[in-house]
Image (spheres, rainbow, N blue to C red):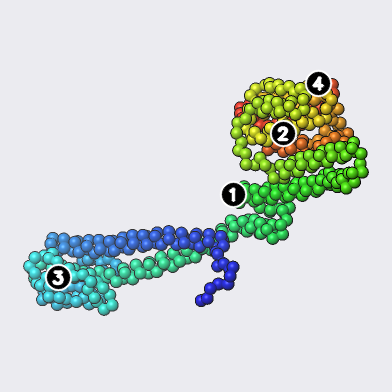
Amino acid sequence: MGPSPLGRRPRLLSLRTTFAVSFATVTAAVTLVVGVLSYSAAARLVRVDQESVFDQVVQDLRAEVRLQRLSPVDFSSSARGHDIVRPARTDVQVLGPDGGIFDPAGPRLPVTDADRRAAGADTAGRMVEHEDVDVGHDVFRVATVALGGGRGAVQVAQEFSDTEDLLRALQRRTLVLMGAVVTGAGLFGWWLARRITRRLVVLTSAAENVARTRRLGIQVPVTGPDEVGRLGRAFDLMLGRLAQSEEDQRRLVQDAGHELRTPLTSLRTNISLLRRIDELPPAAREELVADLGQEARELTDLVNELVELAAGQWAGEPPQPVDVARIADDVAAVARRRTGREIHVRAGGGTTTAEGRPAMLTRAISNLVENAAKFDPDGTGPIEVVVVGRALPGTVRVEVLDRGPGIRDADLARVFDRFYRAADARSRPGSGLGLSIVREVALAHGGAPFAYRRDGGGSVIGFTVVGAAAEDEPLGDAPGD
């Protein structure tokens, strides 16, 4: 047989067939062991029972001839008043004093010299035993018991071939029964495997459909409380998450393309002016170069934030216990140098330790502080960073308070959307991704972002994360909500 075509693999057994064959194989092995043991025990019991019956008849005969002076006539089948025990498949043949057959058995039994000597023996109860005596097509066990005084002997024979025929019939029936059990087990295993794997087949078809069509928004019709049902629900949830992720990526690309057009258009406009830079007055030249630098910085910041959102640069950072208040102190120190603003950090409540990624939390707090400084550039009051432990059961709450223009009620629900910028903030620098990153960080740490107007003017923007000991915290209300 030649080699198989390139790329062609041998067809593997299906799970249904494997399950059915395995079920039938195990059942066959168990049935074989049980059948062999059962037949062996039954055959042994039958043989032992037949031998014990024969031995008991012979012993009774020997005891009888020793107690009474009996003659061949007494054991004749036509004699009246004497009834020798004749169990099933047992024959009796009576020998005369000379060893000749006085009263033959059903099948005539052979008489040997030893039997003739027993017939002429003086001692009653003397026995000569023969094993496996062939009489016609049957096999007998024969015992010759002397009557004593030379009066003759009695031969008792038990047919063993009938017993073996019975055991062979039992053996055939056992084999037939074993075959029926194995066949039934195979059919039941096939039915059971089909019932069990039916939902797996549906799940496999759904997975193949997704691989073929690349459509993630399909429903997986697999239900049930068992492992297959859990697998179906997990697969359905996974497809939902992948579909949502694909939609988020598509929307991110669309939004990014839209946002990139504005700085790129401005760059093209300013670059076209560079061709006539010699014609511009010095003040216009300085303004043009400054605009180009500002647009390049904004474009760089936008691209960096897009990369962070799309690729998740913190994904490789392992979670670890971090002190959120200490991170806020470090962020405030850097922001003071950058902005020259006064920034106060306050920690309160219980422990401010959380299980999180330091770089992610640092970026989220930095975005909040930079956002507050950007929207309150001329503010004389300090920017406040408040870190509250146990604000909610098992959470750490971070909030940044400013005295800027505040957030309109219509914008509060959308400030964390990607690229969303309120109407009065569109003239300010920024990409509209800072607070969106804050939301992603909060969700990645099991928390949520929040924003509301501050009494007396300004806004409060922050987020919560799950604390390091969330299980044992009592219920409570967050202050300031």
Residue 227's disc is: 1
- The residue shown at (37%, 67%) is 171
Q: Secondary structure at mark 3?
A: strand
Q: Secondary structure at mark 4?
A: loop
Residue 350's disc is: none
Precedes in sequence: disc 2 or disc 1: 1
Q: Residues within 10 Å of mark 3 (few under 14, many from 20)?
A: many
Q: Nearer the viewer, mark 1 or mark 3?
A: 1
- The residue shown at (56%, 62%) is 14
**Do residues under tags 2 and 3 come within 8 Å of each other at their CB atoms?**
no
- In screen coordinates, is 200 left or right of 283? left
Which residue sits furthest front? 278
- Which residue position holds label 4? 381
Per the model, the C-alpha gap separating discs 1 and 4 is 60 Å
Per the model, the C-alpha gap separating discs 1 and 3 is 80 Å
Q: Nearer the viewer, mark 4 or mark 2?
A: 4
Q: Secondary structure at mark 2?
A: helix
Per the model, the C-alpha gap separating discs 2 and 3 is 117 Å
Q: Amino acid at mark 1?
A: Glu
- Which residue position holds label 2? 364
Q: Amino acid at mark 3?
A: Ala
